[in-house]
Image: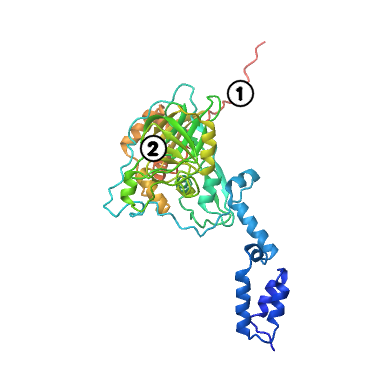
């Protein structure tokens, strides 16, 4: 009896191994079966096979490729291996960060209120650090996304997208050079304990005054549930915390459970630092895409690997200072730097569209920059200042004019008298 053309390829598929291969082949060659019966028999035998046996029919080369993909998904392992290639699946949907129905019933939304940027910022403390890190570039590899690159370089989503407004977040062109905005001006506040600048969506931990602070990107509260500013302390540290939804959360989403135990479904992640402000925490996250966004209920979210580092460093009683300073000015060496971060409304636009509404520099912002820079107005390049405030790229740019080099007078030999 002629073998079915549907069964023959299946026999080739099993040629790698499989303890029951000979039995299958013997039964398939039996004249008592018609082609459809043979196909049903194969399906039945595959169904009753153990998972380990079923997995073993995959070609060895394919198994190795799958193992390599698993390794490449682990961003922490990538750092240890010192490789710049970051590959994660590109099938992840864009999180509904600022969709009207996200985490709330349908209701009328209010316009977002931006931070007042015309206020003169306080002076840096004596002997304070002014800046941190250095600017870098990165050549995009195959299958990279901006989320992968941001996490690899310890950046948030809006942070890296604001610095590269013309780059597609999900399918950046391989080989394209993108800016890694690792160079930052530190907030103008006391440099003790944990310091957070909401405008930068970044946290700094000053462990040793003689050393650079540790810095981490964070996710913060969305409109209507903003992370508060001010001073507080860490009152409790908990590993494997239990998450209890607040009354507001349950009112908005009645299907929420009473609590969520420690595990992969816990929104608090693996570690949590409880603050003196009720219901506000610094914690990990089971959704790394939320880091560098304004999507929380007011808590400060961190990458899973970052919260572990901070948790092991800080003690109960550490001070936490939260400020909101979108525009920073600082002197580093002989240069005056200006850093303009996106406003609240612009951050929302960057998350959704990749670009923001352009706003020209107002006279009030100009006066605030002059007061903060503390140099004569004529020494500031106002064309650059306007460009920086307009673009809001989120990294420092030199704004002072460089003095023209003095022309050296030719040396002339004087008259020699006897």
Residue 70 coordinates in the image, percent (x, y): 61, 54
Q: Report the side of 188 relative to 405 (left or right).
A: left
Specify the quadrant of the image occupied by residue 64.
bottom right
Name the image quarter holding residue 124: top left
Relative to 113, say whether 171 is above or below: below
Q: Which residue lies furthest to the bottom in this view?
A: 1
Q: Which of marks 2 and 1 is in front?
A: 2
Q: In which quarter of the image is the C terminus?
A: top right
Residue at screen point 31% across, 35% down: 364
| 140 vs 233: above or below | below
Which residue position holds label 2?
280
Q: Position of residue 178 (x, y in %)?
A: 53, 49
Q: How many numbered discs?
A: 2
- Identity of the residue drawn at 51% across and 60% down: 91
Residue 402 in sight from this viewpoint: no
Determine the image quadrant of residue 400: top left
Q: Name the residue under label 1.
A: 411
């Amino acid at each position: 009896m002629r073998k079915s053309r549907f069964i023959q390829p299946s026999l080739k598929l099993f040629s790698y191994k499989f303890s029951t291969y000979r039995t299958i082949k013997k039964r398939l060659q039996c004249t008592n079966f018609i082609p459809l019966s043979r196909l049903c028999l194969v399906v039945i035998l595959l169904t009753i096979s153990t998972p380990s046996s079923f997995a073993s029919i995959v070609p060895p080369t394919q198994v190795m490729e799958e193992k390599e993909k698993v390794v490449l998904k682990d961003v922490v392992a990538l750092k240890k291996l010192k490789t710049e290639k970051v590959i994660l699946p590109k099938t992840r949907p864009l999180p509904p960060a600022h969709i009207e129905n996200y985490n709330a019933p349908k209701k009328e939304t209010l316009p977002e209120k931006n931070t007042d940027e015309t206020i003169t910022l306080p002076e840096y403390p004596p002997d304070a650090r002014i800046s941190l890190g250095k600017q870098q570039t990165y050549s995009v590899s195959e299958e990279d996304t901006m989320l992968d690159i941001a996490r690899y370089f310890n950046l948030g989503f809006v942070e890296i997208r604001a610095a590269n407004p013309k780059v597609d977040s999900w399918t950046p062109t391989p080989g394209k050079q993108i800016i890694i905005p690792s160079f930052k001006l530190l907030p103008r506040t006391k440099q003790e304990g944990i310091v957070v600048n909401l405008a930068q969506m970044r946290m700094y931990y000053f462990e040793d005054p003689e050393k650079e602070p540790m810095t981490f990107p964070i996710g913060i509260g969305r409109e209507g549930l903003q992370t508060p500013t001010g001073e507080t302390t860490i009152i409790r540290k908990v590993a494997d915390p239990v998450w209890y939804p607040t009354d507001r959360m349950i009112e908005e989403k009645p299907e929420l459970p009473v609590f969520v135990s420690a595990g992969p479904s816990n929104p608090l992640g693996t570690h949590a630092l409880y603050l003196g402000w009720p219901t506000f925490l610094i914690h990990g996250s089971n959704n790394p895409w939320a880091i560098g966004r304004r999507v929380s209920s007011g808590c400060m979210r961190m990458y899973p690997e970052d919260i572990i580092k901070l948790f092991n460093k800080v003690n109960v009683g550490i001070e936490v200072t939260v400020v909101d300073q979108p525009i920073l000015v600082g002197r580093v060496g002989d240069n005056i730097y200006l850093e303009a971060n996106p406003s609240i409304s612009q951050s929302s636009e960057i998350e959704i569209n990749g670009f923001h509404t352009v706003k020209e520099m107002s006279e009030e912002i100009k006066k605030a920059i002059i007061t903060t820079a503390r140099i004569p107005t004529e020494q500031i390049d106002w064309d650059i200042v306007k460009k920086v405030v307009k673009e809001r790229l989120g990294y420092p740019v030199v704004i002072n004019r460089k003095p023209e080099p003095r022309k050296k007078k030719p040396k002339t030999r004087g008259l020699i008298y006897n």
